[in-house]
Structure formats: structure tokens, C-alpha cells
Image (cartoon, helix red, strand yellow):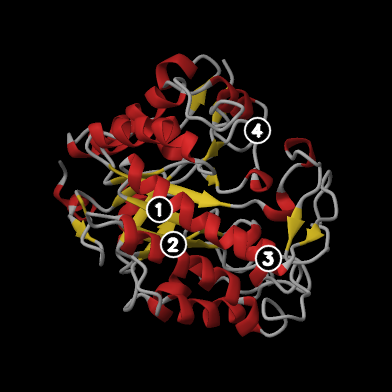
Amino acid sequence: MNSKYQPIFEEFTFKSGVRIKNRILMAPMTNFASKENGIVSDEELPYYKERSGGVGAVITAVAYVTRDGKGFVNEISADSDEMIPGLKRLADTIKGEGAKAILQIFHAGRMAPPDLLEDRQSVSASAVAAERPGLVTPRALTETEIETIIQAFGDATRRAIEAGFDGVEIHGANTYLIQQFFSPHSNRRTDQWGGTIEKRMAFPLAVIDRVKSAVNEFAKHPFVVGYRISPEEVENPGITMADTLTFVDALAEQDLDYLHISVQDFWQGSIRDEEDKQSRVLLIHERVGNKVPIIGVGSLHTPDDVNKSFETGVPLLALGRELIVEPKWIEKVAAGEEDSIATTLTEDDQERLIVPDALWSAIMNRPGWFPVVKK
């Protein structure tokens, strides 16, 4: 191994006591490969196994916590005890290769495609439609339903513990339900769950509290609780960076193991103001990185890209598409073979890369999403 890449391989211990063997995690990426009822499928396991040998931890594709929160075709479910055996197979597969296993959990809210819902009616903080084609105006949740969903996050955490996962990541990003409660675009409530920024923070903080309560009650070993956040929204009104900095101040006091910043590029500036070029990851790290570890992510293709990001002081980094294109990314750096890391793929690479059919179809049908070289 080239000594300049040593920072990648430093061990890291989370506040909870969970230790990972290096500073790189596999980012959560939907693979559309679970069974229709949400049970982990045989097709998913080799895909994860192929990518779990090098990284310190794998954050899985997102699992929905209630049936009305399903966001994708063939998505993993954590909404009932029936899912535990399949979740255990997934956790065992990841851990069997040497990585820690973290289950990402969420509710899609108004972003749930109507065709996936039993009554074709999505729900959210308020009856305000997303500015996306094909989505219906959601029904505003009642206070009782809000409490039910909060409890569902705790129940999903208990199932992750019983299945043998090492942690959960609460998905509070990417315009899904938790973010919808924080956003002034999707949350127009006037009760305890909306209005001021403090009230818009109430739902995500309640979810965190319920998840932590489940960990305290059911976990017999150290267990990670992380939180993923999107820094801004393009909508008006929408989440601004000032909003987010206030929010991360509160998140930093929640005794979390990490904050995972969801952006397309680690160095990306504002999506609301083209003149603001400051990295959103670094702004959050500078604000609260002394209180809670930050996971950076986004367009870190090469070991030199990763090293440059580590030089900022951000302690953990996640690789997503890079590990689809090159499952042995970490192993090649460790062996001094970084020059052989693949950064493109061809239409014939599915079998070699062990990618589920539906995910491969998505890759091939979304130009620009992946660096595909036509033969």
C-alpha cells in the first residue's frame, strides 16, 4: 500500500463503542431487488457480499418502516417481524465479509409513488404536493398517525437489533418524510408539529428519541444510531443552509454516532445560490464536527479524491456508485493496485460486478447516472 493512503485505513470507534476497521463506508443505494413484499431476496445477498470485504461498514439500501411509506419498487421492508429472518440473512452476509452492517430506515411520505400504496394515497406533514411529476397531493397526517409512525421507527430499530445489525441510519434526507416535516415547503402545520423552525424539528427529534429508546431497551451490544440529512432544498419556501445549521446544532446534542451529509459532490456548494461555492459538507463539519462525527460523500472516485477530502478533517467518507463500478476499491488500494481501480463500466459488466437485474436496468437506462462506456 502506498503510505499516502494510510488515512483511509485508520480504525474508528463511534461514541456507542462500535469500531470499524477503516474510515470508508458503503453509501446506502436502492437496488430494487427485494421481494415484492419487502423480504430480502437471494439476488441481493451476493451483491452485498461482493462489496463488504473492504469497507469498514455497509449502510444498506433504505428499508421502509410502515407499508404506506414504501418509496421504491422491490424495496426492503422493516415494517413487521416477518422481515426479521431476511434482514438477518442480509446482516450476516455483510458481517461475514468483515464489515459492520447498518440498516437505513425511512418513510417516503409524499414521495411514495401512488402505484405502490394500497389506497394510492401518500401522506405527509401537510397536504402540499411535491414539485415532481407523477406524484399526488398527499393527505396530511393526523396526530395519532404521526405518533404511530414515530413508534414504527422504534419498532424497525428493534427488528434491526434482533436481526443482528450493528446499527441503523435514520434517513432524514432526500425529500422523504422526516425532511418533509422539517421543510417549510411541505410542512404548513399550525400544531405542535409545525410552524416555527423549532416545531418543524419536533418530528425528526422525536424519531431519534424513539430509536434511541429502542436501542436502550433491546440492544445487548454497542449499536450505532446515525442520521442522514440534506443541507438544502431548491423549493421556495424550502430548507435553507441557515435552517440546516440551526437544525444540526440540535442534532449535535442528540448523542448520535454520526451525521451523514447527503450531497452529489463532497465539494458541492449551494443548490439555492449559484454564487455560494462553499462545500455544504464542510460547513456542517465546521459547525458541529467537534460534537458529532460527519460522514462526507459524493463523487469521490479515486484514492486521491478520498485523501483530499480527509485533509479537511472530516473523519469518515462513504462511497456509493464507486463501489458498484469497482467492488474491490478498498482491497485494491490496500494491495497497492490503485491504478487498476475501475471508474467506468460497459453494458457487459453485470455478471462480473454481481449487480441485481433491476438495478442494472436502472443503470443502463439513466444516462449520466453512471460512467457507461458503449462497446
Which of the two discs, 3 and 2, sits closer to the camera? 3
Q: Is residue 76 left or right of residue 11?
A: right
Question: Callout 2, which amino acid?
Answer: Val
Is 333 above or below relative to 198? above
The 10 Å Cα crowd at callout 4, few under 14, some 14 to 19, many 20 or more, is some
Q: Which residue is mark 1?
A: 168
Residue 79 image position (x, y, % from top left): 54, 44
Of residues 167 and 335, the one drawn nearer to the viewer in this rendering: 167
Residue 320 image position (x, y, % from top left): 45, 43
Quarter of the image for the N terminus: give it.
top left
Tag 1 and tag 3, C-beta contact below 8 Å = no
Residue 77 image position (x, y, % from top left): 54, 39
Q: Secondary structure at mark 2?
A: helix
Q: Secondary structure at mark 1?
A: strand
Q: Which residue is mark 4?
A: 73
Q: Which residue is mark 2?
A: 211
- Res 147 → quadrant: bottom right
Q: Secondary structure at mark 4?
A: loop
Q: Looking at the image, which residue is at 36% across and 55% down?
A: 317
Lower sequence index among marks 4 and 1: 4
Quarter of the image for the C terminus: give it.
top right
Question: Callout 3, which amino acid?
Answer: Thr
Lower sequence index among marks 1 and 3: 3
Tag 2 and tag 1, C-beta contact below 8 Å = yes
Q: Looking at the image, which residue is at 47% across and 75% down?
A: 283
Q: Looking at the image, which residue is at 46% across and 74% down?
A: 284
Q: Is residue 301 left or right of residue 206?
A: left
Tag 4 and tag 1, C-beta contact below 8 Å = no
**Residue at mark 3 to residue at mark 4: CA–CA distance:** 28 Å
Asked if residue 298 shows in the view, the reply is no
The 10 Å Cα crowd at callout 3, few under 14, some 14 to 19, many 20 or more, is few
